[in-house]
Amino acid sequence: MIETNAFQGKRILLGVTGSIAAYKSADLVRRLKEYGAEVRVMMSQGGTQFITPLTLQTVSGNPVSLNFFDADEEAAMGHIKLARWADWILIAPATADCLAKLAHGLADDLISTVCLASEAPLMVAPAMNNKMWSHIATQQNCQRLKQRGIEFIGPESGEQACGEQGEGRLMAVENIVMHLSRKLQAGPLTGKQIVITAGPTHEPIDPVRFIANRSSGKMGYALAQAAVELGAKVTLISGPVALEAPPGCNRIMIETAQQMFDAVMQNLAGTAIYIGCAAVADYRPTHPASAKLKKSAEDDLSLQLRLNPDIITAVANAGERPEMVVGFAAETDDLQKYAQHKLQQKSMDLIAANQVGDGRAFGQDNNALEIFWEGGHKSLAEAPKLEIARELITLITERYHAKNSI
C-alpha cells in the first residue's frame, strides 16, 4: 500500500540513466507529483537517447538538468545547488555503469557528481540485461553500495527488451513509489542511533582453528532491518556470518569477542538503544598458537581459557550509557529463571530469551522469544525471525518512549 501523505512537500531529485526502461520515468514523475512531491530531474547523456528532456520537463514542471559543464548552470554551481535541494535522490533506472560510478566514488558526469556532493539519502532502481546484473563486478558494486546504506529497489525478473529472460527488469513504477513512500514516512525511531551486535565470535586456537558457537546472525540482522524500517540509524557490529548487510545500516565486521567489545565501545557515544544479540564466546584461549598445532597420537590437547570481556555489562555501566540496554539470553533449561537473573545482574532494561538446543533458534529461520523487563513479560510465538524482530523492535520502541516520558 502506498502511503501518499508521505510525499507531501518532499523534494525528490530523480536521476535517469541510459536504459530502455528510462521511458517509465515520465510515469514515475507523474505519480510522485500527484502525491504532492516536488520533483526535479537530472539525466545522463545515455538517458536522453531513450526519453526526451522536454517530456520530463513537462511532467515535472521544472527544467531538466543535463550537462555538468553547462556554463549557465555551473556559473551558479548548479550541481551543488541540486545536491543541497534534494530531500531524497532516486535513480531510476540505474544502469550498471551508474552503479559502478557510485560504488567507486567517481564524479565524471552530473548524476555521479550530485550524488557525491549530497548528504540526501540515495535510492537506486537498477535496470539492465540479466547477464550484466549477475556479473560479479556488478554484484560487488551493489554489495559495496548496500554497505554504505544505499537502498535498492529491485530489479525484477522477467522478459527483457533484448528478448532474454532473467533478473534485471526495472521494478514496476507502482512498487518503486511504494518503497519510497515507506522510506519517507517518519518512523518512531527516526534519528535515533541504535547499536546492534549479531552473530558468533571466533576465538583462535591457532591460525586455522577457533572456538565458536552455532549462531548464524539471522536474528541480529533481522533486528537491524526492523530498526531501519522504523527510521533508526543502525550500526550493526557483526561476527563472522554468511549474510548480506540489511540496506540502510552501517555494518562493522569483527572476528573475536575483544574486537566486538572494542567496536561497541567506540560506537557507543550518542547511542539511544543498544541491543546485544550476538552470541559472544564467554572464553578464549589464553595463548593461541602462532603456527598450526600438530596432532599427536600419544597426547591429549589441553587448552587454557580466559574470560572474555562482558560487553553488555560494560555498556550498561558506561559513562555514556545508552538510554536503553537490551540483551539476549540463549538457554537450554530454566529459561525464565536465568533470563530474569541476567536482567537484574547486568542492569539491563529488557531481555529477550530463547530456548536453544535440539535444532531450535541457532541457524534456523524461525524463532520464539520470552521477553522480560521490570514488572513486565511478553511471549512471542514461533515465527520467521524477521517477523519476530519487527515485533520485538516495536516493543523496545514502546518501552523506550515510555521510559523517556517519565
Image (tube, rainbow, N blue to C red):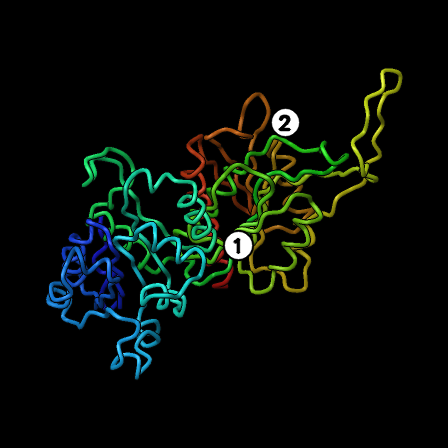
- Residue in front for this viewpoint, 100 or 224: 100
Q: Is residue 211 left or right of residue 97?
A: right
Q: Residue at x 55, y 42 (%)?
A: 372
Residue marked by disc 2: 333
Tag 2 secondary structure: loop
117, above or below 207, in the image: below
Q: Is residue 398 visible?
A: no
Q: How many marks?
A: 2
Task: Indicate the amino acid at tag 1.
Answer: Thr
Q: Is residue 125 visible?
A: yes
Q: Is residue 198 left or right of residue 347?
A: left
Mark 1 crowdedness (10 Å alpha carbons): few <14, some 14-19, many ≥20: many
Q: Residue at x 73, y 47 (%)?
A: 309
Q: Nearer the viewer, mark 2 or mark 1?
A: 1
Image location of residue 211, percent across then percent down: 71, 33
Tag 1 secondary structure: strand
What is the number of the mark on residue 235?
A: 1
Mark 2 crowdedness (10 Å alpha carbons): few <14, some 14-19, many ≥20: few
Q: Is residue 20 left or right of residue 317?
A: left
To which quarter of the image does residue 231 belong? bottom left
What is the number of the mark on residue 43?
A: none
